[in-house]
Image (spheres, rainbow, N blue to C red):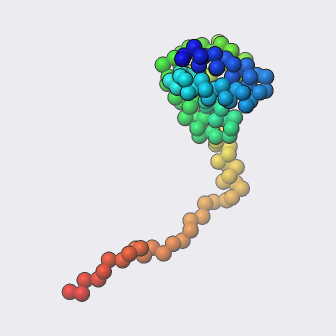
């Protein structure tokens, strides 16, 4: 299974580099299903989540990739030439840093567009008040 997962990973990278995102996403997802503990599968699922705009999920998978058993393995073929030859843990850390920056920027933008968060006033009475003791 690990061989098939590795082949799917390579095919996914090739597809992504050819701008065939649908095939790349499918290959990365299938590779993860076959080898969910692989740093490469975890990192690629983070990449899928990031490309899909799900930055919190991307962070989750990048963190898991950095902690995986084979995180010290070097990257061969990659969607980013700068990643080739680096340890997978370093690539996942770099990707996570970029995602964190994007999340911070998103948060700043939301706060500046909407102003301060306003709380909705509510009646503070208990929902079912305790019966009064007549004694």
Q: Quadrant of residue 118?
A: bottom right
Q: Residue at x 58, y 35 (%)?
A: 59
Observer-nearest residue: 23 or 40?
23
Q: Residue 64 location in percent, x, y?
A: 52, 28
Q: Is residue 29 above or below residue 86?
A: below
Q: Residue at x 20, y 86 (%)?
A: 135
Q: Is residue 60 above or below residue 7?
A: below
Q: Residue at x 70, y 26 (%)?
A: 24
Q: Quadrant of residue 78?
A: top right
Observer-nearest residue: 102 or 134?
134
Q: Is residue 6 above or below residue 118?
A: above
Q: Residue 8 location in percent, x, y?
A: 64, 20
Q: Residue at x 62, y 22 (%)?
A: 91
Left/right of residue 56 with respect to residue 133 in the rendered view: right
Q: Residue 132 location in percent, x, y?
A: 29, 83
Q: How many marks?
A: 0
The quarter in which the N terminus is drawn is top right
Q: Quadrant of residue 126?
A: bottom left
Observer-nearest residue: 39 or 32?
32
Q: Residue 57 location in percent, x, y?
A: 58, 38
In the picture as drawn, the residue positioned furthest to the left comes out as 135
């Amino acid at each position: 299974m690990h061989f098939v997962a590795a082949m799917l990973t390579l095919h996914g990278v090739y597809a992504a580099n050819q701008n065939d995102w649908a095939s790349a996403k499918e290959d990365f997802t299938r590779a993860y299903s076959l080898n969910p503990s692989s740093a490469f599968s975890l990192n690629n699922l983070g990449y899928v989540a990031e490309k899909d705009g799900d930055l919190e999920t991307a962070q989750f998978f990048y963190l898991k990739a950095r902690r995986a058993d084979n995180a010290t393995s070097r990257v061969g073929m990659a969607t980013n030439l700068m990643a080739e030859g680096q340890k997978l843990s370093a690539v996942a850390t770099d990707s996570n840093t970029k995602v964190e920056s994007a999340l911070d920027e998103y948060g700043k933008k939301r706060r500046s567009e909407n102003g301060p968060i306003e709380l909705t006033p509510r009646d503070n009475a208990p929902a079912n008040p305790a019966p009064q003791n007549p004694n």
